[in-house]
Structure formats: C-alpha cells, structure tokens
Image (cartoon, rainbow, N blue to C red):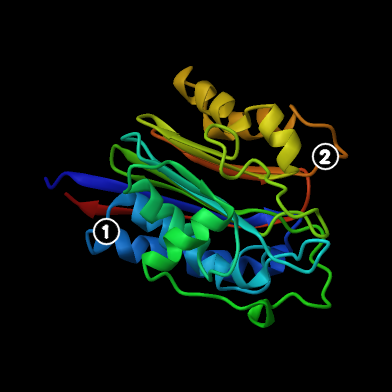
Amino acid sequence: MTDKKKIVVLTHGGAGSDPAHAAGTAIAGQMSMMSLQTGEPIIGAACHAVASLEDDGRFNAGVGSHKRNDGTVEMDASCMDSSGTFGAVAALEGFKNPVRVARIVSQSEYRVLAGRGAAEFARNQGCQTLSPDEIANTGKDFSTTDTVGCVVRSGDEFAAALSTGGIDNAIPGRVGDVPLIGCGLYAGPLGAVAATGDGEAIAMQVTALRAYQLIEQGMDPKAIVPTAIGWFKESTAFGIIVVSKIGFAGGSNRDMAWTASELEIPH
C-alpha cells in the first residue's frame, strides 16, 4: 500500500473579518495546496496563501491595508517553518506583497528588516511596488479586520505566515505582533500557530509560542484554540489557527473568515 502524506492548510482573514469573505480565504488555501503539490517548499506555500490574501482588498493586508494617521501605509509580515527558518519585515512602505519580502529576508543573513532599510532591500530584490492610490480600503470601514495568516502541514513539516496593514489611524512606526517571533506566529517540528487581533496584547502574551508549547504537551488543537482565546479579555479582539500532527482548529472571539482544507497525496 502506498504511503500517504497528509497536507493541511488553514487560512484566515483576521479577527473581525466578515465570514462572508471566506471565499477569499478558500482561494488562498487552494493556492497554497497547489504550490505544495508542485514541490514548493512549505514556507513558500504558506507565503503564497498570504500573498493571495494581501491581493484581496477586503482584508487588512497588502492592497487592503489601513492608513496611518498621516496618510501613509506601513505593513508588517512574517514567515516561519519547522526547520527554524524565519523572516520578517516591519513598517514596510510601498510594496504589494510584504510577505514575499519577508520570505526573501528569511533566505538572507537577516531575520527582521524595518522601515527604509526594508524598502531598499525589497527594491533591490525586484519586489512588486504598490503606490498609495492602489490601496483599496479608502473610505471603507475595515476597522475590525486585522492580520491575515496561514498555517500549513505537509507530512512532518510545518509552516506559518502572516501579513497586516496594522491598526487604522495608528502613528507611523507602530509595530504589532506580526514580525515578532513567537508572538504572532510560531512553527516547530510538532505544529504551527498563527494569531490575529490586538497586536499589543498578542505580543505581551507571547501568544504563538505559548500555544505551540500546548502542542508540545500533546494538547489537541481543538482544545488549544479555546484555551488561547481564554488568555484575552472579551473586549480584546483575538483569533488563532493551529495545526499539529494530531489535527487542526481555528477560532476567534469575533467573527472571522477562515478556511481549512486537507488532502492525502502519495509520498
């Protein structure tokens, strides 16, 4: 009998995102699945899903990003896999897919690049630019949507990726949990975690690493999700997606567009 490899992809549009927009998270998941089946590294597959969400103006990332109080758009993104690869950008201006920049950072000697230096790095790598008038959310109220994300399992490998336009009307230079390892996301040999919601609260709880530690203790993701939600006050927006060798789950204390898909393919 042929040995089968399990593939699982979870994508979310952010705590507070409209569940009616789950078509967008489903398409993102399909992009990730397809790239895995063509032999893409797992971290690249997670980034493909997030790039698809960045290109969907209904979510607060990429072309849907919030503006700062001075009218600028600064974006954060990150990616990580279970082999210990990690890359992130913070307060990046002018690029369509910050998660793709984070992926290139993960292949460099650096781990986190911010601001002007991150933009120069992205330019030197030929990353696709995005002008302020290409940002889709002008005049719309996306105030509740937050970080988009993806977690992936491919056999014994795991990965996670995140992207956000940050808090609407925040001061320039504000950075939340997304580019901070173990806060917004974490991936290790036993699973992967991606969080969304109030970035400051998520960072202060070191949320993703603590959720991963529950995976290490053998807890089922279906129990990890409500446990992690319980770390936050009801007034604090929070959502999370988790995948491990036991299973997968997602949830939020707000509405949240999210999708899970699984597949078994021959080794």
In terms of sequence position, does the residue under pointer 2 or pointer 1 come before the other?
1
Please tell me in which quadrant of the rendered image residue 146 appears.
bottom right
The crowding category of the residue bearing disc 2, from other C-alpha atoms within 10 Å (few below 14, some 14 to 19, many at least 20), is: some
The N terminus lies in quadrant: top left
Kind of residue sitting beneath label 2: Thr
Q: Where is residue 22 in the image (x, y as percent from the top left)?
A: 62, 66
Q: Position of residue 51 (x, y in %)?
A: 49, 65
The crowding category of the residue bearing disc 1, from other C-alpha atoms within 10 Å (few below 14, some 14 to 19, many at least 20), is: some
In the displayed image of the protein, which residue is found farthest to the bottom? 133
For residue 122, side relative to residue 206 (left or right)? left
State whether residue 246 appears in this view: no
Residue 40 marker: 1
Q: Which residue is under mark 2?
A: 236
Foreground residue among 79 and 242 = 79
Please tell me in which quadrant of the rendered image residue 236 appears.
top right
Residue at 69%, 78% (x, y): give it.
Answer: 136
**Dots 2, 1 in contact, CB < 8 A:** no
State whether residue 196 appears in this view: yes
Kind of element beneath mark 2: loop
Please tell me in which quadrant of the rendered image residue 238 appears.
top right
Kind of element beneath mark 1: loop
Q: Position of residue 122 (x, y in %)?
A: 44, 63
Residue at 56%, 67% (x, y): give it.
Answer: 54
